[in-house]
Image (cartoon, helix red, strand yellow):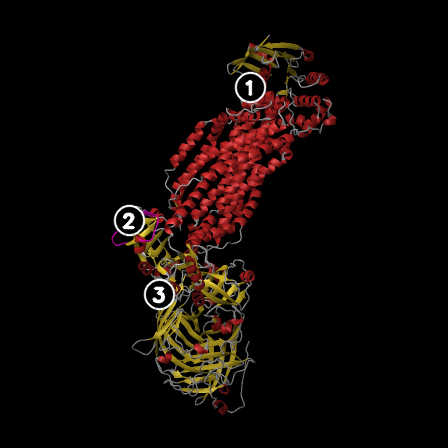
Amino acid sequence: MNVSILILLSCPLLAFAEWIETPAQSSKGHLVPAPDYAPNFPRDHGSHPEYGIEWWYWVGHLQSADEQKTFGFQFTVFRIAGDAEKAENQFDGFFGNQNLFLVHSALSDLESGEYLHLERVYREGWQARASSQTLNLSVGGIQAHLLSGEEGQRVVARYKEANRLELSFRPTKPLVPFGDRGLSRKGADPAAVSWYWSYTRLQAEGILIRDGVEIPVKGTAWMDHEISSSQLGGGLEGWDWTCMQLDDGTEIKAYRLRTGAGESDPWSAVYWIDGEGGTERVYADGFSWEAEDSWTSPNTGLEYPTSVKVTAEHPVRGKQIFRLRPLLDGQEFTGNRSDNAYWEGACEVLNERGDRIGKAYLELAGYGGGLGARLN
Amino acid sequence: MLYLRLAALILVRTTVRHWREKIGSYLLLLAIVAVGVGAFNGIRQASRSASANFGLFNQAISGQSDFLIESPTKTLSADVLYSLGPLSGDPDWHLVPVIEGSITSLDGDGEPQQQLRLVGLDLMGLANLPNLSEAKFDFGEDELTWYDWLGSENSVWIGRKTAEKLGFDEGEAIKFIASGRMREMVVRKIIGVESSSFPDDLVIADLPTAQLLLSRPNELSRIEVIIDRPELRENVDYLETIKSRIARYLPENLAVQPTQNRAADRAAITAAFRLNLTILSLIAILVGAYLILQALDAAVVRRRSEVATLISLGVSRGVLFLTFLLESAVIGSIGSVIGIGVGWLFAYLSAQMLADTVNALYFATTIEAISLTWMDCVFGLCLGFSFTLLAGWLPARDAMQTPPAQVLSRGDWSPGFSWLRNRWIGTVLLVLGSLLLLLPPFPLEAGGKMAVGGFLAAGCWILGAALLSGHLLVGLAGLLRSFSSSPTSRLACSRLHDGSSRHRLAVAGLVVAVGMVTGMFQMVDSFRGTIEQWFNVRFQAELYISERGVTGAGTINGIDPSVMSELVQDETIAYADIVYVSYANPPEGITVLSGVDMEAWSTTIRQLWLKPPGSLEPVEGSEPALISETFARRFGLLEGGSIELETTTGKKSVSPIGIYSDYGNEFGTAAVDISTWKEWTQSERPINVSLYLNEGSDINGVRDRLRLSYPGLDVRNAAELRGVALDIFEQTFKATSALNGIGLVVAFAGLLLGLLAIFDESSRTWLTLRHLGFSKNQFLLSAGLEGAGIGLGAWISGSLVGLALGWLLIFVINVQSFGWTLRWQVPMADFLTFGSLLVIAGFLSGLLAATYWSHKNK
Amino acid sequence: MTTTQSENAQYALSISSARKSFGTVQVLKGVDLGIEPGERIALMGPSGSGKSTLLNCISGIEKLDSGTITLHGQVISDLDGGGLEKLRRESIGYVFQSFHLLPTLTAFENIELPAQLINMPKDERREKVYHMLKSVGLSHRSDHKPDALSGGERQRVAIGRALIHSPGLVLADEPTGSLDTQSGEDVLALLEKLSVDQGVALLMVTHDRSSARICNRVISIQDGLLI
């Protein structure tokens, strides 16, 4: 079933360049990311406990050394802060209650069609620690730290049945901070901002241990590190998000924030990242997001618009059309709770003519229930 | 087939009709079978129910755990979590650290109200568990303020049953004591669970909260492991793979084992105790079987001429044998079915008593509902059926051998039961029993032992004595006869002296019960006496302090070290003998490792020494230790040597320098110096302290003052401690006493039945005497004296074998099963009292039987 | 067939040189006796003369020390236990002095019992029992148990029981010993009638001369020998 949704706003573009002053704290007392913040690394690769919500996110496409197999992967470590008053205290005990960590790991075996995924939740402590001084995560089955002696990260992610993915990531472009004055805005609510730093193109290399067999793999990856205290503005139900890595060496990030009424929030955006890491951006009035096909999950019964067409006005190059097609339908992530499902999977990017021009990861969240309450 | 048909015909036409006429006797028979089966089955079921919850209390919440990670001392430092490395995040399983301890709620007056079990779990981590995702219960609408209840200082969750029982409400603050401290907990929510497996004394808290409430910072009891794929729980290969993966990364001092092992371990710990109890419950069956023999034999007597007539009509002896056997079978079957119900009732009534005993001696347990499995039914049926059939075999054989000519012409015939008159069988049994003593004990799991030779010897001696008791009765009657002048006593003595098989049977049955009872008397009395003597020597301090409110040997939190260190600063204390205790693993089973002031124990503190300190040379390289007698016997260290024990910090070797008597546990204790103990166990928590006060101190005054200052501690003077210990002692023998009581009741029922049969058989004699002018009162008196004579004969024979059994229990069975030496005490006063009661009861039985008989035959 | 055998063939019962001792006491010292089919013999003798012992040996309840007993041509003294039981079921009827009826069975059932023991078909059996009850004059008492019957009635039931299975020989041990004169007369008359009607040989032990009148022959036994 094709559902087309076209949003054209009559308001001038300028309206959405308007600056909304951010408060110092969110309604829960957590710090709100300040504008014009210059991240300081390696410290800012680490955890920011005074802020309410944080995640480290890696997705990518891999190919086995013999080029017979291809995979998609996703790992995310979420941190959710507790009592804002205790946020400053560094916890180094066993069973903390200041932060919760959620781990999502997924692996799409594109040849066999298998999709492994798992979710775990941990309180800060012996099973989940995140350094606030550098990237040093040890959260359940995911360990991540910086490479020593060079820029980059090493991540080990464990899946069920003793499967494991160990990857080293080396950036081919500098880190990109998204948003005006360093703040990525997700809604009209003044506090709905985040620091959003991404490595948009990483070289990935490592080993996949799959069913006891070691498979050397390489490919490309994308990494996000986002820090905020309130993710979605009020009234927002979820988002459709994609990161595309085109074969020409550029990247695109696009996301549509969906309102309860099924429309796109004005703060939805598309970002173009050039070969050197420079960015261009439009908000919702500058692009459309159409579902061209969908997939209904046999597990949850939810319908996901997994084939999409993004039509965006590049400020310089003009209209650009990108079609995303999933490389595997069944990439629905179901966690421990029944109301926590979303679709996130490896896709290919096609141009208007249907030629393959790159690869992407597509995330469709909030189709099973309101995420708004969770992420505020 | 024809045989069976004929037997069935005779059964229906004659036997069943006789039952209708003597319904009372047959109902009594059914009752005897029912009691026998019931006692045995009941003990098994009660035992199982008390054992069933040896398992893990948090299973009620997290579902079934598959593996356990524990240290040999059964406590872990939380630091161990960081040493788990790749184990901690593996998606194929969930690690659930647990801390568990006893707390006692206090009522409004500050008095102990109810002992509860506090279990601390990572409540957030529960969300990952496969069985909990569609939660049996939720921690409330609290989700979004998880950081309010997670890691709170005192929030707890309580089951609905507990809340109702103790009147707790949500939001209520409850005072309690644990580890010697008084604290407060707040009921965050009452959890309403449908599952009935949720124990009604369980309190749940977040793990760090529980550590705080128990005053056990940084401690864990164990780490449970739940596999992520519950559908593979029964797959042995898969579980083995998981276990190997875990074991590969586990630090050296930790062990992973399947949870069934733990339940099995805990069951094994009490195996000796439960086995002994089961054997005791055989009393009821043994005596019951004998009674059935008697009753069926009496039936054969009554139907003697009928049997003779049938033989003369051409009914084959085989058919007659089968008929009487069928009668036994029917009684056995019906009685067993009733017995299964009786067993359930008995189990229901005794389960709590059993659990209390286990609680007192071993570790905390609660009882699960008594379950009646199909196995219990099968067992009960087979048992009752078999022993009734066995008991009925002799009378059936007797019926088969009836000589019709004699019976038909003379009208009566007394069975030869030649084997009863044969001295040899009894003598051979006595000798065989003595030889069986040479058998070595059979090792049980967890290090217990079963004194196989001892039990078999006991059986042989009891049977042998029962068989020979008839001869003693005849001799006794002969002796008494020469002193009796009145017609009634002469008649009674002459009948006893005649030594009919029926008399021999009557006395034999009573001897079995009397022997076992007097044997147990001695053991219990000797035990009590030994413990009292032990107390007199060992417990010389003025005050004794332990954790308050906690009963039971294994629910120990120990005392908060800071409380202890504050306490011993008290200026009235001259010396504080602080003791530390933990488990340790010898090569097989478990044992107890204790930390004491070695110098004081070796020099000034009194003990009952088997081998005083210094009499044994320690082995070089081993830690010198003072060991209990049980420990010494169990590990063959009576003459010295060494043994390796697994502790938190690895394998450690101990070697005795002295051996002392200790009746605290049956697994043995090795006491090393406190500093060594602390190093080995990585723990600082003492279990108790004995205080020696300055000279001239007001003991009770100090006691009262300490009680006020430390409401979380039990402070007792020596007399009070002794009282508590003896209470526990009495507790442990409650079940034994109950079984003894049952055995005696059954035995007296048997005496009554036996006398009835005797009088029935002598109808001709009584009628003749009546014709001769013997009055009814004289008849009754004579019958009473006959009964008293049997009682006296049973007492003498029973006492003789009872003395032998007492010796056996004390010097063989106790030593082999539990490894301790008791001081043999023969409670002469009790013996004599018991004898008088037996004679009186015998007299009354005789009177009763005669009254009934004469009423029936007037 | 030998001479002895041919001699035995003509007798319902033939006893030859029967000897039996109990301990040191010799009770039968070589008894010889022949009873023809349908013949009625009264065996008389003082107490202790061996009468009952002889009866017991014939029925197989006791075993001879030496000698032979032949019943309808079959040497029964050589039979084993099973054979003797079969003998008692099929070939012999017994009437006791003390009746020895089964106390839990009715008159009907007491008479019926031997017929059941030889597996007589039910209909035939019941018919015979009714007929027998009528013959002994107790049709109106068929449902009564022994304790509801008088001595004479009990003995009549016992006679009925002894004959229901048409044995070749009836042994009666003092059949009137426990009865009053009139009852005794009635019982004797019945015994005579039925044994004549059925052609059954009768060996009756008695110490009462007048009882012997229903018999063809009177034999005396003294000190273990027939005189």
The magenta span reads B604-622
Instruction: Report whether C205 appears left or right of A64.
Output: right
Percent of width and height locating residue A329: 48, 71
Residue sitting nearer the eye, B583 or B779: B779
Q: Is residue A309 above or below residue A15?
A: above
Which residue position holds label 1? C62
Please identify the dominant SS of the magenta region.
loop
- Give the secondary structure at mark 3: helix
* Mark linked to residue B641: 2
Percent of width and height locating residue B806: 42, 39
Which residue position holds label 3? B83
Residue type indicated by callout 3: Ser
Chain at numbered mark 1 = C
Residue type indicated by callout 1: Glu
Tell how many labels.
3
Chain at numbered mark 2 = B
